[in-house]
Image: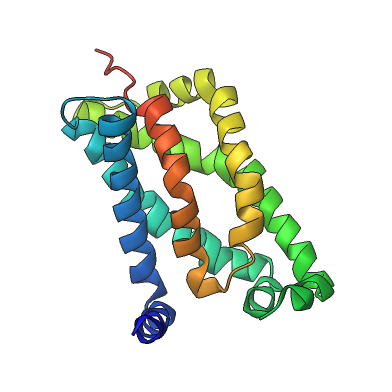
Amino acid sequence: AQGYMWRRFTAWGRANPFALSILTATGKTAAADALTQRCIEGRPSVDARRLALFTAFGFGYLGIAQYWLYTIQFARWFPAATRFGEHATLSARLADRAGLRDLMLQTLAGNFVHIPFAFFPAFYVTQEVVNHGSGASPRRALERYRENAWDDLVAAWQIWIPGHLIFFSTPLWARLPTNHAMSFGFCCVLSFMRGAEPVST
């Protein structure tokens, strides 16, 4: 029964990779924040505004924008990635020199271009919009990121340099779900580090 259900799931995932990305991204990001608030920080209740931030960021950026980047654009920019992810064995991957090259290039691009120049700016701007609504200031959001950047990036790189080496090795349809499964822990870290930042007035 378990094998049958897994085959059904993988068949659905191959046919609906975008929907799978959105569902897993939104669910795990919201769950990570709720878990952090209640179990790690020990709050008596969940801060709804903060949960809205992580739900919106999970849906819009991690679910939609990262799908476009990692599944569509990276496959174009790093053409050996598709074949590399479909290899059935480790030995086949190790023999694929072009695939290994693109794996390293994707890992470098993900960690040293995407994370510092897109992921964190998007997070801080989303947080600013959720906290301030029509009074949101992208400049204020990016200034806060500039102040926190080194600590944020070191925390991210500790997880995502090895993490990208793993999930960029998966088939394209499974790339984002694998990323989201791995990023549950990182979203807990992000929630703990930045989710409770005070709303400035």
**Residue 138, above or below 99:** above
Picture quadrant of residue 36:
top left
Picture quadrant of residue 113:
top right
Way the structure is coloured: rainbow
Q: Nearest the camera: 89 or 141? A: 89
- Give the left or right position of residue 54, taking residue 79 as reference: left
Q: Residue at x 29, y 46 (%)?
A: 31
Picture quadrant of residue 73:
bottom right
Q: Nearest the camera: 84 or 41? A: 41
- Give the left or right position of residue 134, taking residue 57 as reference: left
**Residue 174, above or below 121:** below
Quarter of the image that includes the N terminus: bottom left
Point out residue 134 in the picture as x, y percentages from the top left corner: 20, 30
- Give the left or right position of residue 157, taking residue 34 as reference: right
Point out residue 144 in the picture as x, y percentages from the top left corner: 44, 20
Q: Nearest the camera: 161 or 133? A: 161
Q: Nearest the camera: 100 or 41? A: 41
**Residue 3, above or below 158:** below
Point out residue 196 in the picture as x, y percentages from the top left corner: 31, 23
Q: Residue at x 67, y 56 (%)?
A: 165
Quarter of the image that includes the C terminus: top left
Q: How many marks?
A: 0
Point out residue 143 in the picture as x, y percentages from the top left corner: 46, 20
- For residue 62, say whether it is visible: yes
Q: Residue at x 41, y 52 (%)?
A: 62
- For residue 138, say whether it is visible: no
